Image: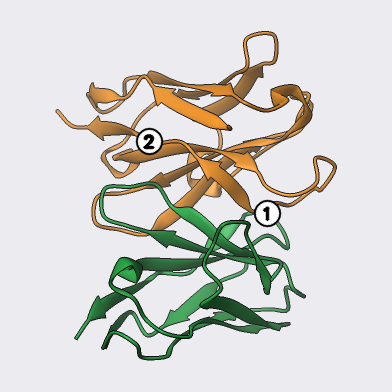
Chain colours: A green, B orange
């Protein structure tokens, strides 16, 4: 199985800060990567698919980049509503696998 | 809009069985693969199983192979997960999710997700 490693596991930043989360795959997955946002007690919500495609309705402050084994999710200006845990997921092969998550907090 | 509603969760003893359901609406259910994903309390997300649009192909994560069975009834727009020989480590919120992207794609992201149903395996 492809292992997905996210960093950091926890991130504390101020409102308005630029925030970057990294996801590394144990082997190349081309651009077959998605990002999700999960708020406490809620189901995950798709943010980005195919590494850099913004899902309809998702604020433009979210962006994704990368290919191969290294990917990033960037929030250009952190807002209070962005407090959540973020997960990456590869869909290059079965088993489909997720990163361990990054919890974003407000400083 | 697309809606997925899971049901069937509850408390069950180790070794027993449980069947989860996911009622789908708002899209052409019979055209899309469907997934189950779970999340243990306080933990991350784990993909469990997928079934193709017509039920002809199914894949499972290793830890549930031989114990869980995914199925679907396209006439009733419903997805199922039959869970046998349950273990404490199967305790989790179970989400159903629609395969994202083109219906013909073999591998998918998940979009959208249902609200989840909690399964607790405990004596």
- The correct choice, above or below, for A60 with respect to B75 in the image is below
In the image: residue A87, left or right of residue B90: right
Image x and y of residue B76, in percent? 62, 9
Dot label at residue A94: 1
Considering every residue shown, the one lying at the far left of the view is B123
Instruction: Choose between A39 and B108: the one closer to the eye.
Output: A39
Mark 1 is surrounded, within 10 Å at the Cα level, by few (under 14), some (14 to 19) or many (20 or more) other residues, namely: some
Circle 1 marks a residue in which chain? A
Residue pictured at 42% horizontal, 26% vertical: B6
Alpha-carbon span between mark 2 and mark 1 = 22 Å
A67 or A19: which is nearer to us? A19
The answer to which image quadrant residue B59 occupies is top right
**Tag 2 secondary structure:** loop
Q: Position of residue B25 (x, y in %)?
A: 59, 22
User: Badge 2 is on which residue?
Assistant: B116
Would you identify the image quadrant in which residue B89 lies?
Answer: top left
Left of B38 or right of it: where is B11? left
């Amino acid at each position: 199985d492809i292992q997905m490693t996210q960093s950091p596991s926890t991130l504390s930043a101020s409102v308005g800060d630029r925030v970057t989360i990294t996801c590394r795959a144990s082997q190349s997955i081309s651009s077959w990567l998605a990002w999700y946002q999960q708020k406490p007690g809620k189901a995950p919500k798709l943010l980005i698919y195919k590494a850099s495609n913004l899902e309809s309705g998702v604020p433009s402050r979210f962006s994704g980049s990368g290919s191969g084994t290294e990917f990033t999710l960037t929030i250009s200006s952190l807002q209070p509503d962005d407090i959540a845990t973020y997960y990456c997921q590869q869909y290059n092969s079965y088993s489909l696998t997720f990163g361990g998550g990054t919890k974003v907090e407000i400083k | 809009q697309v809606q997925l509603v899971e049901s069937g969760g509850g408390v069950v003893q180790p070794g027993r069985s449980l069947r989860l359901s996911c009622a789908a609406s708002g899209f052409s259910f019979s055209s899309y693969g469907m997934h189950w994903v779970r999340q243990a309390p306080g933990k991350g997300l784990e993909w469990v199983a997928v079934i193709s649009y017509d039920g002809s192909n199914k894949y499972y994560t290793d830890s549930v192979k031989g114990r869980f069975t995914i199925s679907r009834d396209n006439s009733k727009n419903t997805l199922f997960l039959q869970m046998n020989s349950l273990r404490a480590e199967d305790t989790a919120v179970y989400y159903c999710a629609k395969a994202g992207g083109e219906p013909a794609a073999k591998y998918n992201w998940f979009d959208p997700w249902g609200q989840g149903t909690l399964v607790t395996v405990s004596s």
